[in-house]
Image: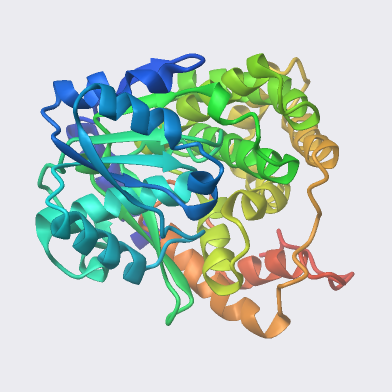
Amino acid sequence: MLLYKTIISVNKQLNKLITIPFPQLETGINSVSEAGALMSSAGAKKVLIVTDKMLHSLGLTNSLCDSLTASNIEFVIFDHVTPDPTVAIVATGADFYKKHDCDAIVALGGGSPIDCAKIIGAKVVKDRPVRSLVGKLKIRKKLPPFMAIPTTAGTGSEATVAAVVSDPTARQKFAIMDPVLLPDFAIIDPSLMTGLPKAMTAATGMDALTHAVEAYIGTFNTPLTDRYAKQAIEKIFKYLPKAYEDGQDLEAREQMSIASYEAGCAFTRAFVGYVHAIAHQLGGMYHIPHGHANAVLLPMVLRFLQPYCMKRMDELAAILGLRDGEEFIDAVIELNRQLNIPTNFPELLPADIPLIAKRALAEAHGTYPVPGYMNQKQCESLLRQFLVEPPQSDNATAA
């Protein structure tokens, strides 16, 4: 583990040299009506709208289109995005952008459309295979004017410098990270989120919580990321159950969307950890929704890491008026229970566990500033706890 620690130490110093800006942010009910004026200010003449077929069919793109039209901006709609967008979908989207002579991009949707739009923009300016962009700082060229309009409160992708793409052939997800992926504009309009199904409200909300928690306990944290993470955690515990129970509660929707943005601001500067590393593998292998995977994994991973970050865990507990990190983990478990999040993965196959663990550790080590290190045996042991009938004698924290 000494090598990994050295790499992380070097990356921490390099991270301080990279300036990550914030998108120009518009919030509030019907704030999507500002989209046209904002894109006009960036010089956009013809916009590629990146979304998915369901959102488009439900009419969630209508107000965006009306706003662009009012500002005399032409647009075409690319609605082929699927959950866990693939390298092929990104390539198709980039070709669509060029075919229609677009000069700007607006993403409307959850994490999948926003991430897909980011990578489409990257491929447009770099004109290279998507897989060659995987990793850190592989783009380094400004994207076309870019706006993100989230319709879920979870991924925080509108505030981040990262995007995730899937390769179905390899059954893997890959992260692309570069400050140029940060949108120029972000519009957070809670009225676009009122129709979100309960299960998706729960999963995306727990995704935001995972972003905030992993950013806080990781070793790249700063006073700025701590502030954003704490604000997000406090809001999520207060408003996620309300948004889950009553999807029409605009206050709860707005507060959750702000929490998602704050968590995004935190983790794009302080990074994530083992929960995300494992969730990416489960998503790539079994197509388990990312937020759902994070929610199921979070309590067990926190239990493993608590001995390495007890002070930080106790500080998280204090946000909620709790005594210590153990009580914080119990609160996460209780929140999952309120949201009907299960405690296992029916899709998980014992034979796949060694490969999942190997890939997760390869992603985490040397990239994510985890507070304590997990080895292959420990990761496999942890994963076996999520089998429908886990072995009774396993101990994920055993050396």
Q: Position of residue 41 (x, y in %)?
A: 15, 20
Rendered position, 54 above or below 353: above
x and y, in percent, of residue 84 in the image:
48, 61
- Name the quadrant containing residue 3: bottom left
Q: Residue at x 59, y 18 (%)?
A: 255
Q: Residue at x 84, y 69 (%)?
A: 388
Among the 4 quarters of the image, the one containing residue 136: bottom left
Q: Nearer the viewer, residue 67 or 330?
A: 67
How many numbered marks appear?
A: 0
Image coords of residue 265 (percent x, y):
40, 29
Seen in the picture, residue 237 relative to 353 is either above or below; the reply is above
Quadrant containing the N terminus is bottom left
Is residue 193 positioned above or below 52 on the image? Answer: above
In the image, taking residue 278 as reference, residue 72 lies left or right, namely: left
Residue at image location 14% in from the left, 26% down from the top? 42
On the question of residue 212 being in view, the answer is yes
Q: Residue at x 49, y 22 (%)?
A: 189
Image vertical order of residue 230 relative to residue 96, above or below: above
Q: Position of residue 195 (x, y in %)?
A: 65, 34
Q: Residue furthest bottom?
A: 351
Location of residue 311 (image quadrant)? top right
* Colour scheme employed for the rendering of this structure: rainbow
Residue 371 visible from this viewpoint: no
Horizontal side, residue 192 vs residue 85: left or right: right
Quadrant location, the C terminus: bottom right
Q: Along the line of sight, which residue is nearer the eye, 285 or 189?
A: 189
